[in-house]
Image: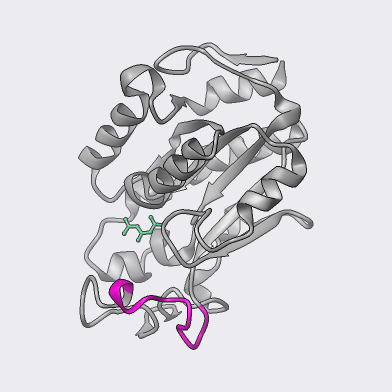
C-alpha cells in the first residue's frame, strides 16, 4: 500500500496496482484563450496555469504504471447524444453544436474538443468521449475500470465543481476511493473550487480526499 500523508481530511492509503488516474476534460475549448470558455466571458488564465502540475501528475502516474484515462466532454455531430435540456442551457448565442471559435462547440472531432497538446494522451491510453458532466454516465468507463480491477481513482482536470465533482460523486457511489489533485484542477470561479474541495473532504471524506500533486508524486515514487 502507498500513503499520501498530506491528503485531507486524513492520509489517503491506496494500492498503486489497483489505482488509475482520470484526467477530466482538459480540452482546448475550456482552457485556451480564443475557445468556447473564453468566448463566454470566462478568464481562462487559472485553467491554463494548472497544465504544468497536471503534466507532472500524468508523468508520475505513467512512471508508476497506473493507467491514465482521459475524458472529453463532447457530442456526436448529429447531436443525438445531447439532450435538448442540455443544449438549451447557457448562452443562446453559443450553444453546443453551434459554430464557435474553434469549430463546432463541444462536437467530437472539432479542434476545440481536443485535449490541449501539452497533455496529449500517450499511445494506448484510453480517451473517453462523454456526453454528460460525469464520466460514468453513458460511457464504458465503469466496465473498463472493473476489467482492470481498479479500486482507487486519482482525479485531475476541469472544471472542479462541474465535471470533476460530478465524476467523483459518481465514482464514490460506485465504491471507489477517490482523491482529487488540488493543484491539477481549476474552476472559472475560485470560490466554487474552494467550496468543492471543502465539501469533498467534509464529514470524514464523504466524497473523498484531496492532496497536492507533490504529495501524490512522492507516494507514487516511493
Ligand atoms: N468539463 C466541464 O466541467 N464542463 C463544463 O461545462 N464546465 C463548466 O464549468 N461550465
Residue drawn at point x = 47 percent, y = 72 percent: 112
Residue drawn at point x = 23 percent, y = 47 percent: 189
Residue 78 colored in magenta in the image? yes
Residue 130 colored in magenta in the image? no
Residue situated furthest front in the rendering: 174
Q: How many marks?
A: 0
Type of secondary structure dominating the magenta stretch: loop
- In the image, is 214 to the left or to the right of 99? right
- Give the x, y percent position of residue 163: 41, 52
- Give the x, y percent position of residue 140: 64, 59
- Give the x, y percent position of residue 42: 25, 60
Which is nearer the eye, 11 or 27? 11
Which is nearer the eye, 78 or 124? 78
Residue 139 location, quadrant: bottom right
- The image shows residue 18, relative to residue 95, as above or below, that is above
Which is nearer the eye, 39 or 136? 136
- In the image, is 172 to the left or to the right of 201? right
- The image shows residue 10, relative to residue 80, as above or below, that is above
- In the image, is 39 to the left or to the right of 104? left
- The image shows residue 190, relative to residue 38, as above or below, that is above
Question: From the image, which quarter does the C terminus lie in?
Answer: top right
Ligand 1 falls in which quarter?
A: bottom left
Q: Which residues are magenta?
A: 76-86
Residue drawn at point x = 73 percent, y = 38 percent: 62
- The image shows residue 154, relative to residue 87, as above or below, that is above
Amino acid at each position: 500500500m502507498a500513503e499520501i500523508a498530506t491528503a485531507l481530511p486524513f492520509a489517503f492509503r491506496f494500492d498503486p496496482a489497483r489505482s488509475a488516474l482520470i484526467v477530466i476534460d482538459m480540452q482546448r475549448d475550456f482552457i485556451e484563450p480564443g475557445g468556447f470558455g473564453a468566448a463566454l466571458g470566462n478568464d481562462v488564465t487559472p485553467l491554463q496555469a494548472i497544465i504544468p502540475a497536471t503534466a507532472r501528475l500524468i508523468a508520475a502516474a505513467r512512471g508508476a504504471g497506473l493507467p491514465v484515462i482521459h475524458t472529453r466532454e463532447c457530442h456526436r455531430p448529429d447531436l443525438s447524444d445531447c439532450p435538448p435540456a442540455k443544449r438549451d442551457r447557457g448562452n443562446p448565442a453559443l450553444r453546443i453544436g453551434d459554430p464557435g471559435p474553434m469549430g463546432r462547440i463541444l462536437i467530437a472531432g472539432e479542434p476545440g474538443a481536443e485535449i490541449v497538446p501539452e497533455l496529449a494522451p500517450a499511445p494506448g491510453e484510453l480517451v473517453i468521449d462523454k456526453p454528460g458532466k460525469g464520466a460514468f454516465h453513458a460511457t464504458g468507463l465503469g466496465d473498463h475500470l472493473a476489467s482492470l480491477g481498479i479500486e482507487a481513482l486519482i482525479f485531475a482536470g476541469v472544471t472542479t465543481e462541474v465535471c470533476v465533482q460530478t465524476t467523483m460523486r459518481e465514482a464514490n457511489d460506485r465504491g471507489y476511493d477517490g482523491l482529487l489533485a488540488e493543484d491539477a484542477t481549476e474552476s472559472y470561479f475560485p470560490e466554487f473550487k474552494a467550496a468543492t474541495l471543502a465539501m469533498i473532504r467534509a464529514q470524514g471524506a464523504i466524497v473523498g480526499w484531496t492532496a497536492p500533486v507533490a504529495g501524490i508524486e512522492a507516494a507514487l515514487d516511493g
